[in-house]
Image (spheres, coloured by chain):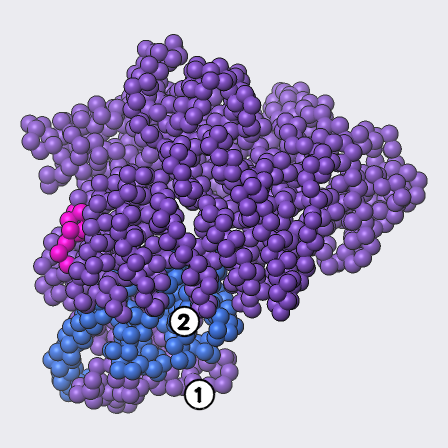
Chain colours: A blue, B purple
Amino acid sequence: MMQFMLLFSRQGKLRLQKWYVPLSDKEKKKITRELVQTVLARKPKMCSFLEWRDLKIVYKRYASLYFCCAIEDQDNELITLEIIHRYVELLDKYFGSVCELDIIFNFEKAYFILDEFLLGGEAQETSKKNVLKAIEQADLLQEDAKEAETPRSVLEEIGLT
Amino acid sequence: MSDVMEKTLTALPSLLSLDSQPGSAKLSANSKLGNLIRGITELTSKHEEEKLIQRELSSIKEQVSSPNTTMRQMKELMVRTIYCEMLGYEASFSYIHAIKLAQQGNVLEKRVGYLAVSLFLNESHELLLLLVNTVLKDLQSTNLIEVCMALTVVSQMFPKDMIPAILPLVEEKLSHSKEIIRRKAVLALYKFYLIAPNQVQHIHNKFRKALCDKDPGVMSASLHIYLQLIQENPEGYKDLTMSFVTILKQVVMGKLPMDFNYHCVPAPWLQIHLLRILSLLGKNDQSMSEIMYEILDESLQRAEMNHNITYAILYECVKCIYTIHPKPDLLEKAAKCIGSFVLSPRINLKYLGLKALTYVVQQDPKLVLQHQMTIIECLDHPDLIIKRETLELLFRITNAQNVTVIVEKMLDFLQVSEDNHTTIDLVGKVAELAEKYAPDNEWFIETMNTVFSVGGDVMQPDIPNSFLKLLLEGFDSVEEDKKLRLFAVNSYVSLLQGEPSRLPQRFLQVICWVLGEYAHLNEDVEPDAVLRLLAKLLDMKSSTSETKSWVLIAMTKLCSGGAAFSVAHEVSETYGSSMDTMLRQRAQELQHLSQDSALQSRVFPRSGSQEPVEVDSSLSFLDGFVSEALAAGAAPYKPPHQRQEEMSRSKVLSLEPYGLSLPISMSSCSVTDRQSPTLLSMSSSLSGDSAELSHKASSTTLKLDGVTRVWGREGYLVQREPVQEAAQVEAPSPLRSPRQQGDEDSPHSQTPTPTPTPESEQEKQQLASSLFVGLASPSSVSLMGKSEQTSQRFRRKARIQDKPPTSGEQINNLPPGGAADLLLDSNVSSELVSSLEQTHRNSLDLTANGACDAELPDGDVKEIKTPLSTDDSVLAAGLSPHEGPDRPKDLCLTSYLPAELSGLSHSEITLLCTNQSLDLSACHVQKEDCVELVVFIKNSSDSAAHQLQMQISCEEIEVSCVCDSPVEELKSHSVTVCQYFLTVKRPSVCFDLVGMVYYQLAAGSLQTAQFLYKLPLTSFIRPLAVSTEEYGTMWLAFSHDTKQNLPLMKDEREPLTATLNLLKTKLQLHVVEIIGEEGIVACCLRPDQQCLLHCRMHAGMLAAWLRSPVPDLPDSLLYHCQRALQER
């Protein structure tokens, strides 16, 4: 089972974090700090796997963004690398050639996609089409909701009602 | 007015975004979030950022709590809060609003609300309870999106206690028409299974339905559950093996829809999951393994494309092939596969190749030889991770001949590694290898010096402990012991003459002890010179008071003689008035003993004789004092737990803040705050809550095993060094003296090259030959086996072997099932035995010595279980456990049942394990107050078995031997019986008793057989006869409870009575009373481990509520009630 996933920039700024094991905020911060430091210190040609505490860390860099997952001892490192890749593919398809800015400004969308792909630390749906379909359906509903609601709420907010 | 303006502005971006694409970054960048993000990027310092975020957060706080904020604005605020939290700023005020948003918003707001909840809270957060109603509502919604959202959040976190509330709804979703809902429901149940397995056990058959689902997504989701279930109990799912193989076949053949392909590989995630499941099912099971061979072969062949994903599958395949029952041609293919990993230019694959080699090395040492040059290269790899993994591999192939080279490589690595975790792990490994294979004294001491300096204060405390123990106990040869000690003394004296301030505290403590004990061995060094060196340590600023106290003890031991007196006097003057009471005590001792050399030599005899110290732990010498005090009107002593009980009884609702914890905190501070070598304060309260104290003491940093009790029957005991008590427990070492050994082992022919330069091929070759010596030819392989048996000169003696089996102590903490089915027989292959025994002892050594589980490489245990890859079937047959568990010959064992037990009912006698010399069977007998385990050992060989010893242990059960005299000898073809009383320490659904039998056949060496005996909780349950009134008071007093609905026997005329009677007969519960629709039932494990059950008929179910003073008991009992009712 995946323990957590972190996305951070080359400057060490956290862009996304998803924890699949219950940890205190203090611990999360400590782990994040240590890991970001360790991963950033590694050179490009080095191995994508790390042994860190009792976990295995799998990371990969896409442009300026690092994707970093922690898995348990019996998990397969290579397939985790592909999980990262599939997630990037999903983001890419959704945003249309994704860049770090997309993830910064629309991080909630990135979370939605992640939740549709991984659930509770396990790959939930590995078919790219199905994941995007699920997201699009929810988005579509959002649009409907917006259309139905926006005129009313704007009037309301301006104080005309 | 400005307020209105601002609101308008807030609404604008979303108005504008109406016609924009979803997911376009540009427009969102205009939002408040965008402004915030841009604002942050423009800042230059962390301080400014902090100020900005705090301002942002306080404005958010104000807005969220305002009643005028719409859900729509709330959504936007929540997104910004998530962002602030991600930056590391706490915004707990918003958590409740996130829940509110999930509850009240429309679909789009709800989605953000749920997201915020899942990011902010974790499953133990109390606010999560407020989410239950929302989830409940959404699960019943007709809107699919809402149902999906609810299931998503449930699969991530849900309060354990509230699972029953939503379980029926989630279960219902398993048969929903949409596959996405079914899939999410399966994953939600998986989550429930992980956090509360008892709650979902009744729906196991529904998991099977999910496994057969027509949608591959649902089916693969159900594999998560099965992987977990099979990991816990492989035996229960053997019947599914064929189904998994069929599924895998279909996947590999490409029968799934194209959607599931990933880079042209059919459903790789699914394949890997199935391979993992298969390896669990095929482990130690030949018939199951045979079903898999074909598909494994197919997978290996199909996965030959050049993409990461195929390598992922190959890697899993190889692991599976090496885990299940071996098949030669598959192993060959797998080995080839490992080869291609190791040789790959891609670093990730190389790393995994090394991992795979490490995994298989014990089965297949030849494979390592094939790749020795690559391994040498990896040893010099610039990436530390690769280097580290290579060392792990080398650690597994270490023997007496290559130990110096390998340890040197490890120490080199330690110098560059900065990671604490790695250091702790590696230091432990070096110490282990040094103890096992050290070629000579000098090397051993020097290596340990490096271990102590590098490991410093982070290493496992048992490393210095066992080192000191080893020095103290020594070996058979007095001469050799003396040399080792002398060398240690000389080495330490010169270290102290250097720069002792650089040495870690733990190392200094070791040095102090050794110098104190053995400095006299070196006649060239004057005692006062040593004293002065020690005194220097006292003046160092870095010395902790613990170290100082070690120094003072060492000085006390050395202070006889004229010149030394002045130093001792000076030091005791200084510390005689120290604020630290422990130091002051030591200084006083030093002062007195240095003046009275007769007393000093009596207190610290130099002869090194190790007569057992008689310890009067009941402190009976104080009896006179106590009776006087009692006569004078003092209150009688009550142990802390009794005091606590009384206090809690007298004040049901005690509001006094510190009332209850006082006794505990007093005793704990007396121990933990003073980590003195002798733990003086501990001995003074020994007669009290000693269990608790010893527990506390174990947490002190430098614990020496047999901490001397300072007070005995005659008053103040002759105070020796701590380790001696432990020595008394141990039998003399069976190991040969180093001298004898040195004569037999050929000296090292190859000189290790310390730092091979990568350019020089020749040097590499040389390094290779020194690293892989002992692995090369078959003859040298067996030589390795032999050398492991003879040359483990410094090996820690496993306590477990030295203790007679009568001891009820539980040292053997093997992980349940971990080595369960292991069976050893040296007649099969000496190589096998030595390597297995080897691993096995390692694990024993480690666990026996307490808190160093971390050092035990995970692979070890696994590899014991895996059948050998060597390709002869005789061997395999010898190793396979459980062969014919119900052979007729076991039946006649009944006649061996001890007479006093023959009248009682006993469980079926089951054959636990068998090898060529011993058959082990067991059954259990339920007595009134306990359960007795009867183990039958039958010697089926033609020679007598000697020195038979048996160890049984279980974490949750206290095992004590019935008969006092252990069976020493077992004649050929005869049977002996061992009996053990079992009492529950910690309730659990099922108990795994792990047993080990040690024996020697006429000519052979020490052999072991191991078995696992499973015992359900029901064997321990006894009816508890209480009246309704007593039940009532007990009910209120018990704190641990659980509730669940159980099936009711509805078809009976009086369903409640019928159900309770069924429980009564099946589980031996006592039905106290049945009143109308309610019934109360009681039982116990021991008189003090009661469990009460309150049942009520409700909506066709039996609402059961269990309470007990013992944690875990209600849950475990509930499990059995449920099973009993389901099985009826």
Which mark is drawn over residue A59?
Answer: none
Q: Position of residue A46 (x, y in %)?
A: 49, 70
Q: Chain of mark 2?
A: A
Residue neighbourhood size for the residue with mark 2, other residues' Cα within 10 Å, grouped as few (<14), some (14–19), many (≥20): many
Question: At numbered mark 1, what does the secondary structure look like: helix, strand or loop?
Answer: helix
Name the mark on residue A60.
2
In this rendering, the answer to whether B110 lies above or below B805 is below
Identify the amino acid type marked 1.
Glu
Q: Quadrant of residue B1049?
A: top left
Q: Quadrant of the C terminus of chain B?
A: top left
Q: Amino acid at mark 2?
A: Lys
Rounded to the nearest whole Å, what is the CA distance between mark 2 and mark 1? 28 Å
Numbered range of the magenta stretch: B206-215
Residue at 56% in and 28% down: B1005
- Looking at the image, residue B333 lies above or below residue B675: below
Return the mark for residue B42: 1
Pinpoint residue B1105: horizontal percent, then vertical percent.
Answer: 24, 37
